[in-house]
């Protein structure tokens, strides 16, 4: 028995059976793993890391228009952080993120619970709930612009609101953008949560029912805790995406009435009124904010996954 | 089963193929067929069926070796410029001929994106109207060939208005009175926060005697009091219901839709709308509207911001000679320029205006263009425009103080000449 167990540990085909060939030192499992992962890491670094580092390098340069003038140190960061515009757009971005992600989570959870039930027409319901998510954001934004705008004023017509200017005043302009975002991405949250719901085994519920747990108790003590990893993943994805929102406010209001997001500001300094140094500084700041929020989530998520993993082994 | 020895080989092959894929990734340079030119421009007339497409077709028929194809850019000027800037900043050769808005000449030439047209200056200058020619030059050098000029008109409803107003105050009085009677909106223009709003605002400001810079743009002539008055007038117009409800979210097309569906009394728009409204069989106003020069604050004369675009040759084109032939042809060929005029797209050739003196749009244009003012085609124009949008847009929407906004713009303009 002992020999077989060592045999199985040794991987098949390890040089011993081939005396004719020069013996090479075997790679360990982890080294081999690293070799396999290397191309993916390299590709990720090329695609994801390079632009970030490059933006940081540019953010330390001084520019006039598109012409480089020399090294600027942290001047661009000082300029960005002392500009009132940065803080107003940060404020809008944060308000947008918190409200839209919260609403998307609640609605998405509702959808997911609904889609997880067995009832007639479930397939059709699932498909139709996902429709908004399939529509490209820019097109959805343009569509909601037409819906909310005074002309042609579809929403005003339907609700008999006359000439209420949703997009032409502060507050309501932000509301319209958040509404469009919730409409667009609640299905995405629902999809992620549905996947989570389906991993919860039915017998856990049966056990709870036998113990006399009410529906709300089953939801609170079984569904929610077991769904936590899926919830965290959904919130992470949505928060990170919401923090870099660009298309919805750009198309619907052009950033008017306090709906200028950080990304719109970045885009302005990179493309519209070019100052690549300042633009890159702003995009680096945006990156740091998003990275920070992402890390907090991953920190929670990591713990959750570890605990969840141990639970399964027991 | 792959044996371990082979595993590392597979890994190596994987890395290699990855490198190969990266190396083979095309630089986005397809360029179409051999010798095909690409003309990058936007707007409704650039779309299939539009007059620019017909011009492109005419050239392609006459020059089968170097046919031209339109790359249709977005409707809004800001977005057209972004598309072009993205390509040109990367020194891409995908665009050979660029439809360059009159305000971009300075920036594009300073960036080294345009091929100089000095060697064909003579024939272009001779054929073109002075305002359009001026907008093609920067720093005393010719960078583009005039093609399409533009100026603002006042569109009004002949069934509701007997005589078009000559002052802005009169316009508002009529807009409020008739709007209430008919239960429709009053005046619509380009009031959304974008370049078009700056154009509209400048027309109010200029028509009260305001100026931005002196001739060679070395000195700021911006008058804070005039700017405050113009902005206050607009804020009051919004407050009093003179402006139609959708004014502050409207660009050209939103405004046209409103007027075309009979929802407003007055509209400030470019001449392109004239033909489109007339052709629309569904429109309740197609036989009940006319055009007039824009009002002023004093009641004398008219003033309009000069718009339109000129054709330039990209410095990164692979086919500069053919591209140059095309832009000169489009600027100086009477057939081409007449095609524009027939479609109510204002041409830049003087001879065509004389020829179309009987056409209502062209004759009014001839009158208005003589008084039209170009926005300064400074390399910093976009920054100036963004600043004006940021200050004057909230100010007229009751979210800022007109006087403070004017002061801030004055300081910003000052900072661009220092």
Image (spheres, rainbow, N blue to C red):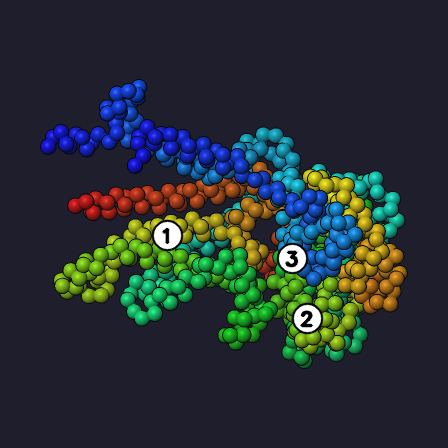
Where residue B259 is drawn, which disc sits there?
2
Q: Nearer the viewer, mark 3 or mark 1?
A: 3
Give percent across and percent down for residue B228.
70, 57
- Residue under pointer 3: B75
Where residue B267 is drawn, which disc sits there?
none
Viewer-nearest residue: B43 or A220: B43
SS at mark 2 in the image:
helix
What residue is rendered at 54% in x and 71% in y? Answer: A154
Q: Is residue B415 left or right of residue A297?
A: right
Task: Give the quadrant of residue B247.
Answer: bottom right
Q: Are the residues at dot 2 and dot 1 in contact (C-beta closer than 8 Å)?
A: no
Chain holding disc 2: B
Viewer-nearest residue: B371 or B119: B119
Viewer-nearest residue: B291 or B15: B15
Which residue is the extreme one toward the bottom?
Answer: B181
Chain holding disc 3: B
- Is residue A30 visible in the rendered structure shown here? no
Quadrant containing the C terminus of chain A is top left
What residue is rendered at 68% in x and 50% in y? Answer: B40
Report crowding for label 1: few under 14, some 14 to 19, many 20 or more residues within 10 A (C-alpha). many
- Is residue A63 visible in the rendered structure shown here? yes
């Amino acid at each position: 028995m002992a020999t077989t167990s060592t045999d199985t540990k040794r991987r098949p085909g390890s040089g011993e059976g081939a005396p004719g060939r020069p013996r090479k030192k075997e790679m360990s499992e982890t080294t081999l793993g690293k070799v396999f992962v290397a191309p993916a890491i390299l590709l990720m670094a090329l695609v994801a890391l390079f632009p970030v580092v490059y933006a940081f390098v540019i953010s330390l340069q001084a520019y006039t228009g598109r012409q480089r003038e020399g090294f600027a140190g942290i001047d661009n960061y000082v300029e960005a952080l002392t500009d009132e515009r940065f803080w107003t757009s940060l404020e809008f971005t944060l308000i947008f993120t918190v409200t839209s992600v919260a609403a998307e989570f609640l609605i998405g959870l509702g959808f997911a619970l609904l889609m997880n039930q067995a009832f007639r027409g479930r397939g059709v319901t699932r498909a139709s709930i996902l429709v908004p998510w399939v529509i490209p954001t820019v097109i959805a934004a343009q569509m909601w612009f037409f819906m909310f705008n005074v002309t042609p004023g579809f929403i005003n017509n339907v609700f008999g609101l006359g000439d209420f200017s949703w997009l032409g005043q502060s507050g309501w302009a932000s509301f319209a953008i958040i509404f469009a975002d919730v409409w667009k991405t609640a299905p995405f949250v629902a999809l992620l949560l549905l996947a989570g719901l389906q991993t919860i085994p039915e017998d856990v519920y049966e056990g709870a029912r036998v113990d006399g747990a009410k529906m709300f108790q089953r939801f609170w003590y079984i569904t929610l805790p077991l769904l936590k990893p899926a919830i965290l993943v959904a919130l992470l994805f949505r928060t990170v995406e919401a923090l870099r929102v660009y298309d919805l406010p750009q198309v619907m209001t052009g950033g008017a009435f306090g709906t200028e997001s950080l990304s719109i500001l970045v885009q302005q300094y990179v493309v519209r009124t070019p100052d690549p140094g300042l633009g890159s500084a702003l995009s680096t700041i945006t990156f740091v904010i998003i990275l920070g929020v992402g890390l907090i989530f991953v920190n929670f998520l990591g713990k959750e996954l570890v605990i969840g993993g141990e639970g399964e082994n027991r | 089963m792959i044996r371990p020895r082979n595993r590392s080989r597979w890994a190596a092959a994987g890395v290699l193929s990855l490198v190969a894929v990266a190396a083979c990734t095309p630089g986005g340079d397809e360029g179409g067929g051999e010798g095909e030119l690409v003309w990058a421009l936007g707007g409704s007339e650039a779309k299939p069926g539009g007059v620019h497409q017909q011009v492109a077709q005419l050239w392609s028929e006459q020059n089968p070796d170097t046919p031209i194809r339109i790359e249709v850019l977005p409707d809004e000027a800001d977005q057209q410029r972004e598309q072009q800037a993205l390509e040109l900043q990367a020194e891409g050769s995908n665009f050979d001929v660029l439809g360059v808005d009159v305000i971009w000449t300075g920036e594009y030439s300073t960036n080294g994106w345009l091929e100089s047209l000095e060697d064909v200056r003579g024939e272009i200058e001779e054929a073109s109207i002075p305002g359009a020619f001026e907008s093609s030059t920067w720093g005393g050098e010719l960078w583009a060939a005039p093609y399409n000029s533009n100026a603002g008109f006042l569109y009004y409803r002949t069934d509701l208005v007997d005589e078009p107003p000559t002052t802005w105050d009169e316009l508002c009085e009529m807009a409020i009175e008739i709007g209430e009677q008919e239960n429709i909106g009053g005046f619509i223009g380009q009031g959304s926060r974008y370049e078009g709003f700056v154009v509209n605002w400048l027309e109010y400001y200029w028509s009260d005697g305001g100026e931005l810079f002196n001739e060679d743009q070395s000195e700021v002539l911006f008058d804070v009091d005039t700017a405050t008055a113009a902005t206050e007038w607009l804020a009051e117009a919004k407050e009093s219901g003179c402006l139609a409800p959708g004014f502050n979210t409207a660009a050209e097309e939103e405004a046209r839709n409103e007027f075309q569906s009979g929802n407003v009394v007055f509209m400030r728009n470019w001449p392109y709308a004239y033909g489109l409204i007339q052709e629309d069989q569904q429109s309740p106003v197609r036989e009940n509207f006319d055009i007039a020069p824009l009002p002023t604050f004093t009641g004398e004369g008219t003033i309009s911001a000069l718009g339109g675009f000129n054709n330039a040759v990209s410095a990164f084109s692979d086919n500069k000679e053919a591209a140059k032939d095309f832009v000169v042809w489009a600027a100086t060929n009477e057939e081409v320029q007449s095609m524009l005029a027939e479609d109510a797209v204002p041409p830049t050739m003087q001879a065509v205006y004389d020829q179309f003196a009987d056409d209502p749009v062209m004759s009014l244009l001839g009158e208005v263009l003589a008084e039209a003012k170009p926005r300064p085609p400074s390399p910093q124009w976009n920054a100036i425009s963004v600043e004006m949008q940021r200050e004057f847009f909230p100010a007229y929407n009751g979210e800022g103080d007109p006087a403070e906004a004017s002061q801030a713009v004055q300081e910003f303009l000052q900072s661009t000449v220092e």
